[in-house]
Amino acid sequence: MQNFKAPERDTLFVTHELLDIQSHYEKLGFEDASEDLVRAIYTEAGKFAENILAPINASGDQEGCKFDDGVVTTPTGFKEAYAQYVEGGWPSMAHPVEFNGQGLPYSLATSLAEWFSGANHSWAMYPGLSQGCMETLKSHGTKEQQDMFLNKLIDGIWTGTMCLTESHCGSDLGMLKCKAEPNDDGTFALTGTKIFISAGEHDLSENIVHIVLARLPDAPKGTKGISLFIVPKYNLDENGEPGERNTVKCGSIEHKMGIKGSATCVINFDGAKGYLIGEPNRGLNCMFTFMNIARIGTGVEGLSACEAAFQGALAYAQDRVQFRSMTGVKNPEGPADPIIVHPDVRRMLLTQKSLAEGNRALANYCMKLVDITSYGKDEAEMKLADAKLALLTPIVKAFLTETAQEATSYGMQVYGGHGYIAEWGMEQLARDTRICTMYEGTTGIQAIDLLARKIMGSNGELLNVFTNEIKEYCAQIRETKQFNAWTNAIDSHVDEWLQITGDIGTSAANNPNELGAASVDYLMYSGYITVGYFWLKMAVVAQQKLDAGTTEVDFYEAKIHTAKFYFDRMLTRTRSLVSAMQSGSDNLMKMDAQLFKVG
Amino acid sequence: MQNFKAPERDTLFVTHELLDIQSHYEKLGFEDASEDLVRAIYTEAGKFAENILAPINASGDQEGCKFDDGVVTTPTGFKEAYAQYVEGGWPSMAHPVEFNGQGLPYSLATSLAEWFSGANHSWAMYPGLSQGCMETLKSHGTKEQQDMFLNKLIDGIWTGTMCLTESHCGSDLGMLKCKAEPNDDGTFALTGTKIFISAGEHDLSENIVHIVLARLPDAPKGTKGISLFIVPKYNLDENGEPGERNTVKCGSIEHKMGIKGSATCVINFDGAKGYLIGEPNRGLNCMFTFMNIARIGTGVEGLSACEAAFQGALAYAQDRVQFRSMTGVKNPEGPADPIIVHPDVRRMLLTQKSLAEGNRALANYCMKLVDITSYGKDEAEMKLADAKLALLTPIVKAFLTETAQEATSYGMQVYGGHGYIAEWGMEQLARDTRICTMYEGTTGIQAIDLLARKIMGSNGELLNVFTNEIKEYCAQIRETKQFNAWTNAIDSHVDEWLQITGDIGTSAANNPNELGAASVDYLMYSGYITVGYFWLKMAVVAQQKLDAGTTEVDFYEAKIHTAKFYFDRMLTRTRSLVSAMQSGSDNLMKMDAQLFKVG
């Protein structure tokens, strides 16, 4: 099995060379986050990912989580790795100093989260869910609630969850039934069953803090009657330490395709003591804060799988010999040539590589936008970042996870039959990342969020804000002759994007199903253009470095070759997506539901 | 979990209404295969698939095969199901009466193989591999070898395997090392290790007949020095019954992503007694007979997964309620509408449906061609069928298995998070069918076979033979105004297909890498056109039935709706494939191998 290597060099390229993250940090007041410090943190994070997390990835998959009467045991080594994670101070990195955090930016922690997830998706979900819980407490908790729960979560001694889904409602939270009845002391008694609760029960931490969506007795129906509660596994004693067990218990864990080291729990609340967080009936609004961050996090999981699959496939393609190159022997000493000489193997590798690197640029760009919305000082700039983030969040979530399916599938395909065998690790990547297009809102949900809620909901304004950035960039580099063809490709794609958006808006005015009918193709189309924009920018930066006489000629030349591949073979996928979008909704909706039959 | 339903009605549509299989059978002398008999066999096969195989599919996956010191135990129920299969006479259906067979056509048995595989992919592999072994013995065995082995295989009392792959050679069989040394009695002693041997060891049958590729001592290097041998698990005693154990033993079984009920074995030959089959050093030629049939069989496995995934997704989409339709409430009694009202869910269902039904038409068309090449009397007709089959075999193998990945992925996606959970059965379908693009020659191998070996190797003749058929059909129905747009779409696609093929030929004359660079996109492009041709034909047949006043209005209207979906949203995928093909090989090959790096 290929050992996972943290993509340190490429992350530095994206953050420091493409996105100029240093001046961004300085501007936001993160003077401490100097390039030296960032590099030092990268080194430590790389060691943690490669030496601690990666070695327990395959064994964690084989062993899985164990369930026994409410008690969940994580795979061998998970608990020890988590203890090292806490000891290393990783949970607190991007939290404010006032809550015992280290006061470093969100973007730094999240670009490293890619590596942790790439090394071990299952393990990385435990701290990942905790971050969501912390964000909610930070944004919506009272001072008292923060004092009770937040410091321990930031220390990592406790972990957190987000309890949304019930068996009859996933996407459509308006139907949820879990109820919260007021106790005399101002707390609430929660009753109901939640499913699909990642990290809902485990043996990594002393306490688990559940953030739970439930209904108050007098709540209106639908999404406007949902409130948010904090429900700890152990109630706190007078010293704020875990005391007696709350009446919340794991009923079972799911048997899943992948992420088997991550406990996916049924959680039963039986009059469990909870604390209302935020205002009554406004729970879903509070959740949106967290959900946007979680969606970027899920996109990053997809990105991490692209990277890991590329690494695995490349190692095999360089090592495995089979047939001779069609243009003559390349490896005369061996019985055959390494399969990287074959064009179709190259096509698969470059698909993975161009997705991993292009998606990394887009993901880190969004992390930078999150920084601005969280720590910014200039209101206009914050508003602009917020607008771009609103547009790009569903794209990052869905595009990065959908393309991860292709990249991990190619990971197996490059190995031939060996890709299907557990010991090579490639099939685990495909199984683990398969969840990413489903949880945190399916691709279909993201696509409707993008096209209906964000773009049509803003009368196209959110799209204009981002396409203006692209158009400005294209205008700015138009004189760089070397990149004329790619600049024109992006420029004309943006024109087409705006045109198609207008056309869909027009037809949707008469028939709202036109939005749903175009939505997923529209999202993927938007994704290919957006990542194409970043590939153009990366090629320009790489050429500047080459022109300036870099010592890393291979690295930058590879960037330009990969950009060429992307423009020739990935961006052109928009052609079929346009045809599909423009075909309208009749080909989906005219067929009566009763005509769908099996047999 | 959705119960699998044998697609009896749709198979009848394809075989009897689209392909006029009855007159085909009569012409080939299968007068016994009347429509009544075929329907009776369909009914029995449907029961076997639904009642015997489907119920042990999920349990077989959970349990897997067990290995203990060379002994392989299949999952609970597999052995009993196989006994019923033998008792029902299924193994012998399509074998000549002279070998104890029932003398029915290949196409009949193979269209039913789709159902068995749809019900239980793992189980269906045991008899599937046997068929390959029997074909080899039938075509290349001596009378004595056939007497020794073939009757028992046809009865199903014994099963067979194909032993090709070694750890260092899969696609590139020229490198194989397994050796065969002559014994004094005319037999051979085989020594070496084979891997990935499906059904290589199990508890279903009294004996296992391995067909093994190996090298004679004086054999030339490469593919021209490979011979074919029969190696039984038990040597035969004087009565032709299994006697003492041969020195062939299962070394281990693989831990795989899926098809866990199918034993994938390492087989060690330690001077094992074998019989040369066919001429020395001509083993690979003998294998090709079998491999073409096996490739169609693998395509059919992909088709079966499309069908099963559609069935599962449809059942859930009709049952699961979530949100209201954007055009108004459709299910006022319920808390929400069934998700089949949402356009994007429809898009996924229709993708599955149009692939399952379109691919079924293509697969059965190829089975009909196999019938003609096997049982035909008219030499010109046989030659034509052989040419079409040569062209279509790699398309069936790769297109049907690649599209199965999408269809099974949508099977999960329609379920949202539930799709990831084992109990719904959708994730097993995706895992099981994932092997199909890898075994029996990867998609990349099929694509090179199609473009380089078949099309360029025949100077385009094999392509012309099939495109002529399509052009003639288009000319013939040009006056049916209703289908003008679709006819034109197919007709112009065929022109483009020929044009692009010529262009690739021209550029490949200077640079053979142009073939590999275009190959997989070319194969998928060819597949979309080919299946589009069958969708046009199916729509025409459906309209004829509607015009004639059928009682099955829903069935035929669904066909026309599905055809529309295919033309609007599936055939248009060719647009991006054309862009990719035309982009040439530079974007793949100009980047030095050393520039591929991780980190």
Image: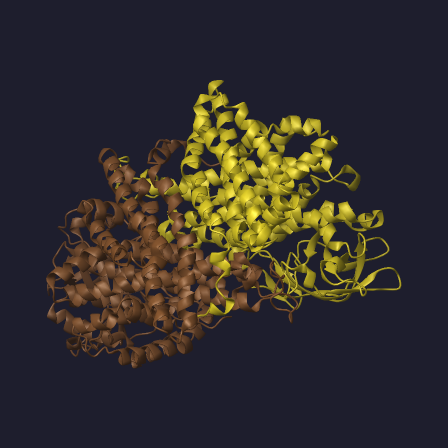
Chain colours: A brown, B yellow
Q: Quadrant of residue B244?
A: bottom right
User: Front-most of B64 and A301?
Assistant: A301
Is B419 placed above or below A145 here?
above
Q: Residue at x 34, y 34 (%)?
A: A589
Of all residues, the one furthest to the right in this rendering is: B184
Q: Position of residue B19 (x, y in %)?
A: 59, 30
Residue A191 appears left or right of B124: left
- From where the camera sits, is residue B177 visible? yes
Q: Quadrant of residue B377?
A: top right
Q: Residue at x 50, y 38 (%)?
A: B496
Of all residues, the one furthest to the top in this rendering is: B548
Q: Residue at x 43, y 30 (%)?
A: B558
Q: Position of residue A176 (x, y in %)?
A: 24, 51
Residue B583 appears left or right of A49: right
Q: Position of residue A376 (x, y in %)?
A: 15, 66
- From where the camera sits, is residue A258 visible? no
User: Front-most of A94 and B105?
Assistant: A94
Q: Position of residue A332 (x, y in %)?
A: 64, 69
User: Front-most of B135 and A263?
Assistant: B135
Is A243 placed above or below B98 here?
below
Residue A319 appears left or right of B222: left
